Image (spheres, helix red, strand yellow):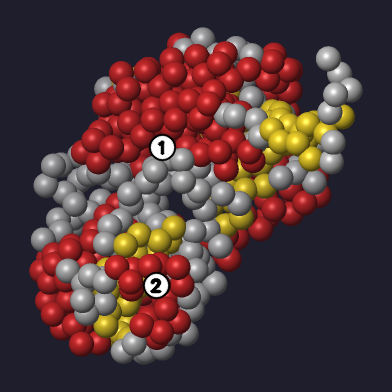
């Protein structure tokens, strides 16, 4: 078995299939965004690897489904306990691999993985069948595990997002093949050491590493797959969605965002400016970030004074350093994408108010950038950048604010700052998005539905919404009085 030392921790570079580590003849490089150091040569899966993983998941499915919610919950709780005991190890590896701030990973992000497994285990056990009488029959809705599921996850917050998507699938009784992103695969590999330690039956939870374009089609087009779940770009979702359509396979996708952060004149401007400056966290590589600042004209200058002061306090540096608040971007290709958006905006006549370049420290860092677009139709307004780039526009009326908020094809989240309860209700309902926060940001209840509209996604995750997705719902009707 091939293992490497990363941040002083032993990490497997191989797949995990049928309860054991499996290597590949070919590998791909995994380098740290912090300094370009080669962290690992990772097994490069292909169609044969996908077939092996799906065969293992298919064979394991009947017994896993038959365990029932309580039997499966015991495994998920054990896995959650192991995650809790290994938070620092996983965080230190993920920091090197993805470059998210180490203190954030240790304080909240990795531990969320344990909460995901606990939450879905408990929700599955607590599920109450709907029972009612109609037309002389007694009716019950049964939730039946659907079969093997393929879950494809992104390179940002890879450990947490992988657990967020796989926990409901496993709790619902599906077996799972997880394909993490090739830019940050190592913390997901650590998860499967814990899966093994937790004593999961072989084939229930499988890991396939590899390049998306190479192994993805074999995973998504296979007729054994009964559910597909994806988090990532809208363009990739279109490709996976076509495969799902061909196989008549239910498909959920959590995609990009071009989310509005709306500040009204009656808002707490200090709070609004603080939260707006926080949208640069993780180098803006957060799909839920409010990247379009929409500020009421009468408080524009007062807001900007507070905002710039907050942004001035940001520190670009090594994400392992406690003083750092902005980490590097994930990959040179992604840096080129982000800088390309800004350069095209500059060429199109949008005003670059601050930032708009790499800092003197070089590497993969990019300065916190604010753009005044020449038009609401500017590319920088209408398309997801996924970097530390915000735009600022002003509005005069509530109706104008709502129109601007809803003026892109995305609809993942919205953030509203106001001191009026009536406006909070009106505007919160009017913004077209899967989640709208008022006077707060990134507060999550795991039982609430989560997802997007338009280009931001299909379906909902969270709570019973996710458990229903991974199940086939059956209505059982029995003629009243016909059995005893």
Instruction: Answer left or right for 77 relative to 35.
Output: right
| Picture residue at 12% right of the left edge, 72% below the top | 306
Q: Which residue is mark 2?
A: 427
The label nearer to you, 1 versus 2, is: 2
Badge count: 2
Q: Examine the image and state in which quarter residue 171 appears.
A: top right
The x, y position of residue 204, in whole percent, is 62, 20
Where disc 1 sits, the SS reads helix
How many other residues sit within 10 Å of disc 2, few (<14), some (14-19) or many (≥20)? many
**Residue 49 position (above or below residue 233):** above
The x, y position of residue 69, in whole percent, is 59, 20
Where disc 2 sits, the SS reads helix
| Picture residue at 23% right of the left edge, 35% below the top | 107
| Picture residue at 83% right of the left edge, 34% below the top | 137
The x, y position of residue 246, in whole percent, is 81, 49
Q: Nearer the viewer, residue 101 or 414?
A: 414
Q: Which residue is mark 1?
A: 160
Specify which label sits upstream in the sequence, 1 or 2: 1
Q: CA distance from mark 1 to mark 2?
A: 31 Å
Can residue 384 be seen from the camera position used here?
no
> Quadrant location of the C terminus?
top right
**Residue 183 position (above or below residue 478):** below
């Amino acid at each position: 078995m091939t293992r490497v030392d990363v941040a002083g921790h032993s990490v497997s570079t191989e797949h995990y299939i049928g309860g054991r580590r499996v290597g590949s003849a070919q590998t791909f490089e995994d380098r740290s965004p912090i300094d370009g150091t080669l962290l690992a040569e990772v097994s490069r899966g292909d169609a044969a690897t996908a077939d092996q993983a799906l065969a293992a998941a298919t064979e394991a499915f009947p017994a896993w489904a038959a365990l029932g919610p309580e039997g499966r919950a015991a495994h998920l709780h054990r896995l959650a306990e192991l995650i809790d005991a290994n938070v620092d190890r996983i965080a230190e590896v993920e920091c090197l691999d993805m470059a998210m701030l180490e203190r954030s990973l240790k304080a909240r992000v990795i531990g969320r993985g344990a909460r995901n497994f606990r939450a879905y285990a408990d929700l599955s056990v607590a599920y109450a069948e709907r029972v009612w009488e109609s037309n002389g029959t007694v009716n019950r809705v049964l939730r039946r595990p659907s079969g093997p599921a393929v879950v494809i996850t992104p390179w940002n917050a890879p450990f947490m997002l992988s657990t967020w998507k796989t926990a409901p699938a496993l709790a619902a009784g599906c077996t799972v093949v997880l394909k993490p992103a090739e830019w940050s695969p190592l913390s997901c590999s650590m998860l499967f050491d814990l899966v093994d330690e937790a004593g999961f039956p072989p084939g229930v939870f499988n890991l396939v590493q590899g390049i998306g374009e190479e192994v993805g089609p074999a995973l998504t087009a296979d007729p054994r797959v009964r559910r597909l779940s994806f988090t990532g770009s809208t363009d990739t979702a279109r490709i996976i969605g076509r495969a799902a359509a061909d196989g008549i396979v239910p498909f959920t996708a959590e995609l990009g965002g071009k989310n509005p952060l709306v500040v009204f004149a009656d808002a707490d401007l200090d709070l609004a400016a603080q939260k707006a400056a926080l949208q640069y966290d993780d180098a803006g590589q957060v799909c839920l970030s409010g990247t379009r600042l929409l500020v009421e004209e009468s408080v524009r200058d007062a807001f900007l004074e507070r905002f710039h002061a907050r942004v001035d306090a940001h520190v670009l540096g090594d994400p392992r350093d406690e003083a750092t608040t902005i980490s590097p971007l994930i990959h040179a290709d992604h840096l080129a994408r982000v800088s390309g958006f800004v350069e095209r905006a500059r060429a199109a006549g949008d005003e670059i108010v601050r930032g708009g370049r790499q800092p003197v420290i070089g590497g993969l860092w990019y300065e916190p950038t604010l753009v005044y677009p020449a038009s609401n139709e500017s590319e920088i307004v209408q398309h997801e950048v996924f970097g530390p780039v915000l735009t600022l526009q002003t509005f005069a009326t509530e109706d104008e604010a709502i129109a601007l908020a809803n003026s892109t094809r995305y609809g993942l989240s919205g953030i509203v700052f106001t001191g009026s309860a009536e406006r909070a209700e009106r505007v919160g309902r009017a913004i077209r998005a899967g989640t709208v926060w008022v006077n707060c940001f990134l507060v999550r209840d795991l039982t609430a539905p989560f997802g997007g509209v338009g280009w931001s996604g299909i379906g909902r995750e969270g709570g019973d919404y996710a458990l229903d997705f991974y199940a086939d719902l059956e209505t059982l009707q029995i003629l009243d009085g016909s059995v005893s």
